[in-house]
């Protein structure tokens, strides 16, 4: 298992591109808020979820139909994502948001956000996604240890993320090296999935 801290990584251009893409999406959403209002944690996480779709490659069989961003449980993040992705596309695929109350609907998702507010159902949602080409993202403190791929973390009051490549490899998706360069930590090694 390899752990690479963010400050030891190189490639400032790649980091800047990913962060810029996240902030451009977030800034396009800002006019809907009060001018003096600082974006909330949910707003920033929603912008990241939208932009993750630009830096992930799914198997060709997943390239048909809309890209579905699912939110497990009744998390308010789903409303924010819904507003952010309305009318947007990634690689010619329209993006849609869906809230899931139960794990049975996970199979249609391209990206699955499992909130820490899923009230004991986090493992059920992750089990339903296991082995499927679904990018799993969460915000609970042990999300990567539970088998998730990307975990949101707070670093100096800023939302950032860590990556578990072992989980990425099991799900047969490929994360862009540009995305990995921006992660606070990356555990595991790229395989046939992993990084490109």
Image: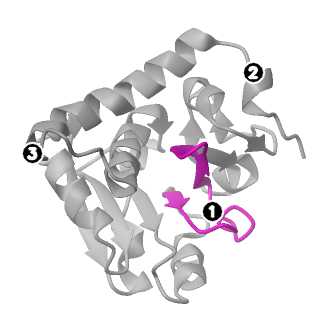
Q: Position of residue 152 (x, y in %)?
A: 55, 53
Q: Which residue is mark 2?
A: 9
Q: Residue at x 10, y 38 (%)?
A: 31
Q: Can you say whether 104 is above or below 182 in the image?
A: below
Reply yes or no: does residue 88 show up in magenta.
no
N-terminal-most mark, 1 or 2 = 2
Residue 121, position as x, y percentages in the image: 52, 87
**Is any atom of residue 64 visible in this view?**
yes
Residue at horizontal 63 percent and vertical 36 percent from the top? 183
**Frontmost residue, 122 versus 130:** 122
* Residue 191 coordinates in the image, percent (x, y): 75, 40
Magenta stretch?
135-160
The answer to which of 84 and 132 lies nearer the viewer is 84
**Disc 2 secondary structure class:** loop
Residue nearest the viewer, comparing 5 with 171: 5
Residue nearer the viewer, 91 or 26:
26
Tell me which label, 2 or 3, sits earlier in the chain: 2
Tag in front: 1 or 3: 3
Q: Which residue is mark 1?
A: 148
Q: Is residue 91 visible?
A: no
Image quadrant where residue 50 sits: top left
Looking at the rendered structure, which numbered label has been put on residue 32?
3
């Amino acid at each position: 298992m390899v752990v690479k801290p963010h400050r030891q990584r190189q490639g400032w251009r790649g980091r800047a591109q990913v962060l810029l893409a996240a902030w451009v999406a977030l800034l396009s959403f800002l006019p809907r808020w009060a001018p003096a209002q600082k974006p909330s944690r949910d707003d920033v996480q929603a912008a990241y979820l939208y932009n993750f779709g630009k830096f992930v490659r799914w198997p060709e069989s997943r390239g048909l139909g809309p890209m579905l961003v699912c939110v497990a449980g009744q998390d308010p993040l789903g409303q924010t994502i819904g507003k952010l992705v309305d009318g947007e596309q990634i690689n010619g695929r329209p993006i849609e948001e869906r809230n899931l109350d139960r794990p049975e609907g996970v199979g249609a998702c391209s990206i699955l956000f499992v909130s820490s507010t899923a009230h004991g159902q986090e493992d059920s949602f992750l089990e339903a996604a296991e082995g499927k080409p679904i990018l799993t993202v969460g915000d609970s403190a042990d999300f990567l240890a539970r088998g998730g791929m990307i975990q949101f973390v707070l670093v100096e009051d800023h939302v950032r993320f860590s990556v578990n490549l072992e989980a990425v490899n099991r799900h047969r998706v490929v994360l862009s090296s540009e995305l990995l360069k921006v992660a606070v930590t990356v555990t595991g090694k790229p395989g046939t999935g992993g990084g490109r």
